[in-house]
Structures are given as C-alpha cells and as structure tokens.
Amino acid sequence: MMGNGQDTLAELDAIRVLGMLFQARHGCTSAEREVGATFSVDVELYADLSRPAKTDDLKDTIDIAKVYNTVGEVMNGEVHNLTEAVAENIAKTLKERFNILRAVTVRIHKSRAPMGGPTGGFEVEIFR
C-alpha cells in the first residue's frame, strides 16, 4: 500500500455484491413514480482486505448484509428523477458507513424505462 493513504485499484481487493433487487419509484415521469420499477443494483467495494483475511473476523471487513441494507435504505428513501443521482447517493452512503472502503463502483440496471420502444432497459455505472 502507498504510505500516503492514496491507494490505487491495483493495490486494493474487491468485494462484489451483485443483483440486489429493489422495487422503487425513481424516474422522471409521473407514471414511473406512481407504479415504480424493479432496479437491479451491483456494487464493487474496494478495500485492503489483508487484515480480515488474517483475523477471520467479520468486524474487520465489509459486512455484506449491511451493504444490502444500506443500498435498500437509499433505494427506498428519497426519490430521484435520475438513476445517476441514486447511484451517487448509494456510493456516498456506502463510503460514509464503511471506513475501510477506499473506492466503490455502483451499477444500477432499470429494466423498464420510457425510451420510446422495446429495450432490455438501461444501466448507469459510477466509480467513486
């Protein structure tokens, strides 16, 4: 690890929590806000996991049940027009709650969105 606390991704380990499903009302149209939609959320959490690997103790790592609950709180909390804003809020909240977290990728897939024709949905991905 770099001594100044500025880790590079090559020096960090990752925990991925994939396919978390939430019913939420984020969107720009009144129909999206009334009916809601299913969102699939993936997060990649970057941290130095050498300590938990040695101690084998949950308190030293990122508790994935708490990750799921945190993402759920954001998804079911303040309603946003844009999926980008939801992703930003998830990243910010995760970084605040898990002190070993150095970076996070949030990927949100929305299968139904008003795009003017049939699609497989869309996805927003941010890295913080």
Image (spheres, rainbow, N blue to C red):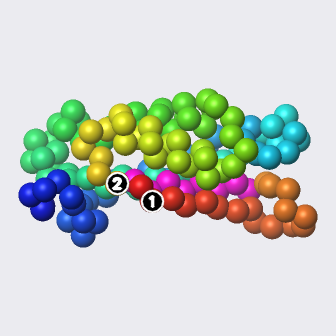
Q: Which mark sits nearer the N-terminus, 1 or 2?
A: 2
Quadrant hosting residue 127: bottom left
Spot occupied by residue 18 in the image (x, y as percentages of width and height):
49, 53
For label 2, the SS is strand
Examine the rendered structure and indicate whether residue 118 appears above or below residue 101.
Answer: below
On screen, residue 103 versus residue 17, left or right, reads: left
What kind of secondary structure does the magenta stretch mostly adopt? strand
Query: Badges 1 and 2: C-beta atoms under 8 Å apart?
Result: yes
Specify the amino acid type for callout 2: Ala
Highlighted magenta segment, given as a residue range? 104-111
What is the C-alpha distance between the residues marked 1 and 2?
A: 7 Å
The percent coordinates of residue 63 (x first, y second) are 33, 38
Q: Which amino acid does label 1 sit on?
A: Phe
Which dot marks residue 127?
A: 1
For the point 53% across and 42% down, the residue is 89
Can you say whether 58 is above or below 115 in the image? above
Instruction: Name the residue at the bottom extreme.
Output: 10
Q: How crowded is mark 2: few (under 14 residues within 10 Å), some or many (20 or more)?
A: some
Look at the image and tell me whether residue 24 can be seen: no
For residue 56, side relative to residue 38 (left or right)? left
| Relative to 113, 60 lies left or right | left
